[in-house]
Image (tube, grey):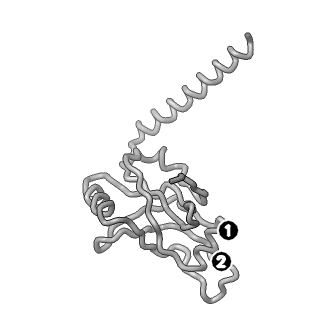
Amino acid sequence: MSDYKKIIAQNKKASFEYFIEERFEAGIILTGSEVKSIRNGKVTIADTHAAMNKNELFLYNCHIAEYEQAGRFNHSTKRTRKLLLKKKELQKIIGKIKLKGYTLIALSMYFNKKNLVKIELGLSKGKKQHDKRQAIKDKDWEREQGRVLRDKKGLR
């Protein structure tokens, strides 16, 4: 099975804000105008998270812009959307969410090889301020190391 993914939107701040421990792929229930808008790339998942409601997972705060040609059949831009997961995955996620500090955040939205919209969810814990500072220091150090190595190769 190939890992074809046509990425629509990514949450680039997620790895900076959270420790991502596990990743899950979930389907999402959408209306026709939402899919058309997603195909145009009019989706934002920056502050999107998933939460449990009556033993089901729902996606909150996902902004999908209205599709202009839909007219009166358009959708609400920030409505809650149901996520589709296998029962074992759902029970595993619900068990971990109930633990203190775990959050289920959206990492990316993409089309799979069958052209279905999928969302990648990350089971994560929030980082403290000092963890974020350390991540910035590590990134700067790696960048500086690359710069020094590149300069040494160029001189010889």
Q: Amino acid at mark 2?
A: Tyr
Residue at far front of view: 1
Label 2 with label 1: CB-CB less than 8 Å:
yes
Residue bearing the label numbered 1: 40
Image disc number at residue 137:
none
Q: Residue at x 63, y 72 (%)?
A: 37
Residue 5 pos. (x, y %):
57, 56
Residue bearing the label numbered 2: 67
Q: Residues within 10 Å of mark 1 (few under 14, many from 20)?
A: few
Q: Nearer the viewer, residue 122 or 1?
A: 1
Q: Residue at x 65, y 23 (%)?
A: 147
Residue 122 pos. (x, y %):
42, 53
Q: Residue at x 46, y 67 (%)?
A: 27
Q: Amino acid at mark 1?
A: Asn
Looking at the picture, does residue 109 appear above or below residue 80? above
Looking at the picture, does residue 93 appear above or below residue 146? below
For the residues labelled 2 and 1, the Cα–Cα distance comes to: 9 Å
Q: For residue 74, which quarter of the picture?
A: bottom right
Judge from the rendering whether residue 113 lies leftward or rightward of residue 26; answer left or right. Answer: right
User: Where does the C terminus fall, quadrant-wise?
Assistant: top right
Q: Nearer the viewer, residue 31 or 68?
A: 31
Secondary-structure class at tag 2: loop
Secondary-structure class at tag 1: loop
Judge from the rendering whether residue 14 lies leftward or rightward of residue 154; answer left or right. Answer: left
Q: Residues within 10 Å of mark 2 (few under 14, many from 20)?
A: many
Which callout, 2 or 1, points at the residue further toward the start of the chain?
Answer: 1
